[in-house]
């Protein structure tokens, strides 16, 4: 169903597309980071694409499995044309930065903050990029594969012992 | 912002904005939200929402357990409608596996998901009424939910955290007396729901508190990623069950109730109407459902019978392998979405071919709703925070995960 | 009130403590510190089917100053822990704490980076309710256990 | 002189302690039980003395005892003097206003006769006034004067707590109570014009007259609109739900008394219940005929359209009248609870709008209509 939009993207941003696939019927486009915002804007504004509902934004950490380590994953939906698409942007660990899509969909505001909080991917141009789920002063990014699951950083200890 | 507030029209009366912190432990904040408010008198001039007080590491926990063991974690996402989450997760894994559940299984899943949805909407409506001081309506709503929970308990064995679904099937079939029980409960619920309608629908105070409060336009709602009753209250008829019918929803006749202006009262009405639609869907399911197997016929996914486990060596080994190593899911990634109580509940699963999820991301509908809250509150009064926040139906487990 | 130390052990003291404890156990104003799933069962306990009010414990006071019983309902994360501690400290004596559900009692199955492994690492707890979430009957049972416990409390503890 | 003081003290004990306080305390119980009834529950019933449970009445005792021995906390950052005195400022005025409430008619020690307009006149000697504490003239004004003092307790308490929630609550209290006092006063003007007095007992006596020979001239009959307006405004004045905006539990946690614990907190809540009793008494006195029982006068029942009088002893009549008054008050208290458990809470500005834009203009219109009516009928 959304084959068409992949073709549209290929026609317009051929140099930006690294690869495409449609595992289990989910159309996926892997993009370069450079002109990401242009691609997103294109997806939102073109009448036959009209991806106006930002569905989901997350990061996959391919620690020691793949290079580059992180993949920022966008899921978009178009209410008008009933299409869905998944975009993936691979970024390196050393340079884990992606331009913020806040200006295109305000709905990605918290998703980007969450990705920053839990994975440490920085979204350039985000107006308020700070931790959202964890508290200020938390060290590290818990959803990275190299963060041990039960490494705790307690703020309060037992009553009586002032921490 | 402060500077703007200090300037009044004639410039002679200064008003200093007051900052107020609401929550996280505040009766209206569900215990898990902190709001920093800038107040100009009683008017909220700016607000900032802080979440994360119930972050329980859903994703990290899921990565540490097998595909099947994720089920209890999904229960505790939206703990008001846990069966919707169960179904959503199972469908995601099944999509990744490339299988489809049996017909009977899908009907049962639909029935159970819809009962869960009724419970969810009842809780939401009741809680908003309670927060407005209408404690009686709240208790009526909880009574409806209680009846439904008692029924689900006979099916799933648990009142709230069911873990009822399994990849490729269900824990158990419906009990034989499910249908008469459901009819009896439906009757009881109907009278209670009528009572709630009578208490609230035309109540002048309730109307005044809900009408034209917390308004959001359809465009803004879409841009914020709204789904579910909150989006539908703005007039957008997006419902996953209609837009991309999964299971047997394509065989169901039901309406998508939509609001007009996207205020609290619309959200209330949409929820109340969806309850009616859910009743009708369950009715249709019960008519269409036919006897048959509830699990797919695949020894790699479904646990063997207890007879086989104790009686044959193959059964023991199969049981052991599935329990200890988990079912094997082919490498790949998938995004599967269903309509949960609050909107589109998406699961983005990544598998590397092992018995555990490599990544199990959930797209919580509340998350998108919550980030629009400051916009929905701006310019309204302190007292309006309560119904607006209530009508969003923020569920901590789902929002913070 | 300063009087207790003189009365401890005397006949008057023990009668006074009996009467006081009796009053306290039937007048538990609760502060619901509700965070997660257990909150749903907490609502059910308050609702018509189970009706916690029979024990005189239905009045929620959202100001910790006026509450006697702190119900910690649901998972407490490290981010929330200081808040819980503060609420506990703001409560006026005498006060009791009920850890409602597995998460509040022990962290439940959330053995990970963000969850407090039982609220007894932060504040003292009087009654633990197991279950994920506990059934309303269990909650009522816990309430009755707490009432028994209150009845047995010696006078000098009731400063 | 000593006798007079002793008698007044006895009346204070009788009326305030025996009646008002007991009704107010019972209201806390009735509140919980009524809620339970409406919500298909049982409500408190476990507290017991021996094997007596008395349908949960014993819970009142438990609550009182517990509150008495709870830690009395004064926040360090608060203004401790004002903080400590505020609950009494709220509670005492609420009790004071009962001083002028007539629970029964004047008592003639040497017998009385009923004159043509159905009022008893003493045959010999001066009438005594055993059913109200003080018979100072202008009872209605005294009540208004004292009730308006009550606002100080709440708003000072809210301010002295040094807590933002309490402050918002305190500000809301003052706004709400001051505006509703205006409306409350105005709704009664029509009544004053009809009865031509501000003495409460005289008003009640005037309500004993019959219209067209059968309809008691109660306030609710001659001023029906004013009855509803006054009742609404008076409930708002008590700060009880649905007008509990100053303490709005879901927004302000506990509003102006958020920092109060133990007895001081109990005094605030109790003063609200006492205010409810006061409202019930005022409505009874002004609109429901006070101690009047229809057709019952000093010498017995004067049923309409019947010539002869069903004779009753004078003392029995007076007793029935006091009983009728108490019954009406208790009924109205219960009625307030019924309202409380049915309606959601107003919003602050909606409450103000209701007061200033609905009740006030309506009561003004009521005054005008009454005036015109009186003008024409007087001719």
Image (cartoon, rainbow, N blue to C red):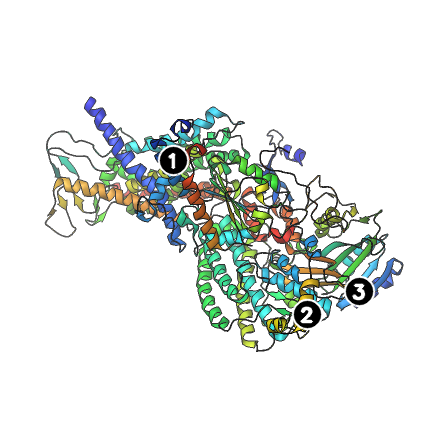
* Label 1, residues with CA under 10 Å away: few <14, some 14-19, many ≥20: many
Image point (12%, 45%), residue name: D312
Indicate the position of residue D177 as horizontal and vertical percent values. 43, 36
Same chain under badges 2 and 3? The reply is no
The residue carrying mark 2 is B318
Place of residue D204 in the rendered image (x, y in percent of width and height, measured from the top left): 24, 39
The residues tagged by marks 3 and 1 sit, at their Cα atoms, a distance apart of 78 Å
Circle 1 sits on which residue? C17
From this viewpoint, is residue C89 visible?
yes
The residue that disc 3 covers is: A5
Same chain check for tags 3 and 1:
no
> What x and y, as percent, mark residue B348?
72, 60
Q: CA distance from mark 2 to mark 3?
A: 44 Å
Near mark 2 (Cα within 10 A), the count class, few <14, some 14-19 or many ≥20, is some
Image-based side of D128 in relation to D99, left or right: left
Across the whole image, how many numbered discs are drawn on residues?
3
């Amino acid at each position: 169903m959304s084959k068409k939009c992949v073709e549209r993207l290929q026609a317009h941003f051929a140099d930006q597309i690294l690869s495409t696939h449609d595992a289990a019927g989910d159309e996926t486009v892997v993009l370069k980071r450079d002109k990401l915002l242009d691609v997103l804007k294109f997806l939102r504004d073109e009448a036959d694409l009209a991806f106006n509902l930002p569905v989901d934004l997350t990061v996959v950490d391919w620690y020691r499995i793949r290079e580059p380590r992180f993949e920022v994953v966008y899921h978009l939906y178009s209410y008008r044309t009933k299409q869905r698409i998944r975009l993936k942007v691979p970024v390196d660990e050393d340079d884990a930065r992606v331009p913020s899509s806040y200006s295109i969909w305000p709905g990605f505001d918290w998703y980007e903050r969450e990705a920053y909080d839990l994975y440490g991917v920085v979204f350039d141009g985000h107006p308020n990029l700070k931790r959202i789920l964890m508290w200020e002063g938390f060290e590290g990014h818990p959803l990275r594969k190299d963060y041990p699951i039960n490494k705790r950083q307690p703020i309060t200890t037992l009553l009586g012992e002032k921490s | 912002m402060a500077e703007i507030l200090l300037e009044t029209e004639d410039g002679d009366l200064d008003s200093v904005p007051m900052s107020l912190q609401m929550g996280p432990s505040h009766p209206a904040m569900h215990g898990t939200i902190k709001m920093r408010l800038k107040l100009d008198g009683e008017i909220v001039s700016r607000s900032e929402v802080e979440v994360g007080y119930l972050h329980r590491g859903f994703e990290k926990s899921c990565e540490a357990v097998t595909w099947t063991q994720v089920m209890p974690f999904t229960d505790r996402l939206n703990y008001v409608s846990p069966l919707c989450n169960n179904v959503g997760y199972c469908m995601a894994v099944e999509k990744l596996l490339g299988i489809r559940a049996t017909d009977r299984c899908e009907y049962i899943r639909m029935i159970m998901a819809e009962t869960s949805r009724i419970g969810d909407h009842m809780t939401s409506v009741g809680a908003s009424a309670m927060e407005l001081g209408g404690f009686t309506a709240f208790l009526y709503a909880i009574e409806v939910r209680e009846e439904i929970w008692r029924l689900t308990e006979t099916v799933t064995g648990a009142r709230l955290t069911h873990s009822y679904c399994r990849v490729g099937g269900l824990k158990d079939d419906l009990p034989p007396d499910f249908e008469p029980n459901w009819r009896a409960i439906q009757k009881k619920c109907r009278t209670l729901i009528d009572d709630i309608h009578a208490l609230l629908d035309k109540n002048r105070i309730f109307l005044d508190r809900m009408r034209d409060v917390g308004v959001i336009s359809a465009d803004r709602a879409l841009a914020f990623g709204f789904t579910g009753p909150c989006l539908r209250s703005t007039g957008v008829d997006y419902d996953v069950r209609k837009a991309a019918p999964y299971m047997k929803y394509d065989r169901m006749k039901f309406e998508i109730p939509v609001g007009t202006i996207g205020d609290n009262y619309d959200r209330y009405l949409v929820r109340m109407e969806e309850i009616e639609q859910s009743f009708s869907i369950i009715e249709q399911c019960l008519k269409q459902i036919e006897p048959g197997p509830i699990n797919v016929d695949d020894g790699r996914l479904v646990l063997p019978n207890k007879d086989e486990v104790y009686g044959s060596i193959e059964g023991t080994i199969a049981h052991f392998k599935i329990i200890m190593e988990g079912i094997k899911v082919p490498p790949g990634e998938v995004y599967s979405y269903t309509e949960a109580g609050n909107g589109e509940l998406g699961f983005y699963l990544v598998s590397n071919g092992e018995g555990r999820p490599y990544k199990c991301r959930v797209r919580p509908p509340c998350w998108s709703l919550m980030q629009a809250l400051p916009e929905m509150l701006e310019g309204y009064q302190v007292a309006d925070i309560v119904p607006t926040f209530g009508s969003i139906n923020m569920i901590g487990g789902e929002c913070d995960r | 009130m300063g009087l207790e130390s003189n009365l401890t052990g005397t006949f008057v003291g023990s009668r006074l403590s009996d009467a006081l404890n009796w009053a306290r156990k039937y007048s538990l104003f609760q502060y619901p510190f509700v965070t997660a799933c257990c909150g749903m069962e907490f609502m059910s306990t308050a609702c018509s089917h189970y009706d916690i009010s029979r024990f005189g414990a239905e009045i929620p006071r959202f100001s910790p100053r006026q509450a006697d019983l702190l119900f910690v309902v649901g998972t407490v994360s490290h981010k929330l822990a200081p808040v819980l501690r503060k609420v506990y400290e703001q409560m006026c004596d005498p006060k009791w704490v009920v850890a409602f559900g597995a998460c509040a009692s022990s962290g439940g199955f959330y053995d990970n980076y963000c969850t407090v492994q039982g609220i007894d690492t932060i504040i003292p707890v009087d009654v633990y309710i197991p279950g994920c979430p506990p059934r309303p009957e269990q909650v009522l049972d816990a309430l009755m256990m707490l009432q028994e416990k209150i009845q047995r409390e010696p006078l000098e503890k009731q400063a | 002189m000593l006798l007079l003081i002793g008698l007044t003290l006895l009346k204070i004990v009788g009326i305030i302690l025996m009646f008002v306080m007991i009704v107010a305390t019972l209201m806390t119980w009735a509140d919980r039980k009524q809620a339970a009834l409406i919500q298909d529950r049982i409500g408190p019933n476990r507290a017991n003395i021996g094997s007596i449970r008395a349908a949960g009445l014993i819970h009142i005792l438990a609550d009182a005892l517990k509150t008495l021995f709870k830690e009395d906390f004064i926040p360090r950052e608060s203004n401790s003097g004002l903080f400590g005195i505020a609950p009494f400022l709220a509670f005492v005025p609420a009790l004071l206003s009962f001083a002028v409430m007539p629970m029964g008619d004047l008592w003639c020690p040497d017998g009385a006769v009923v004159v043509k307009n159905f009022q008893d006149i003493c045959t010999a000697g001066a009438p005594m006034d055993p059913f109200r504490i003080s018979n100072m003239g202008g009872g209605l004004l005294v009540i208004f004067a004292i009730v308006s003092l009550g606002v100080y307790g709440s708003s000072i308490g809210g301010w002295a707590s040094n807590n933002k929630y309490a402050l918002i609550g305190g500000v809301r209290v003052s706004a709400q109570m001051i505006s509703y006092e205006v409306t409350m006063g105005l709704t009664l003007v029509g009544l004053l014009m009809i009865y031509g007095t501000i003495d409460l007992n005289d008003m009640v006596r005037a309500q004993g007259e019959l219209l067209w020979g059968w309809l008691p001239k109660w306030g609710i009959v001659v001023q029906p609109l004013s009855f509803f307006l006054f009742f609404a405004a008076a409930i708002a004045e008590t700060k009880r739900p649905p007008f509990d905006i100053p303490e709005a539990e879901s927004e302000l946690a506990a509003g102006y008394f958020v920092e109060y614990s133990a007895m001081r907190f109990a005094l605030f809540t109790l003063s609200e219940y006492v205010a409810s009793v006061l409202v019930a008494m005022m409505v009874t006195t002004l609109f429901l005929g006070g101690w009047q029982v229809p057709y019952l006068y000093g010498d017995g029942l004067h049923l309409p359209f019947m010539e002869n009088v069903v004779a009753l002893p004078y003392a029995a009549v007076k007793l029935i009248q006091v009983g009728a008054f108490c019954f009406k008050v208790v009924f109205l208290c219960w009625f307030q609870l019924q309202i409380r458990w049915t309606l959601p809470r107003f919003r602050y500005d909606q409450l103000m709008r209701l007061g200033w834009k609905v009740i006030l203009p309506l009561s003004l219109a009521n005054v005008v209509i009454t005036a015109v009516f009186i003008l024409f009928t007087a001719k």
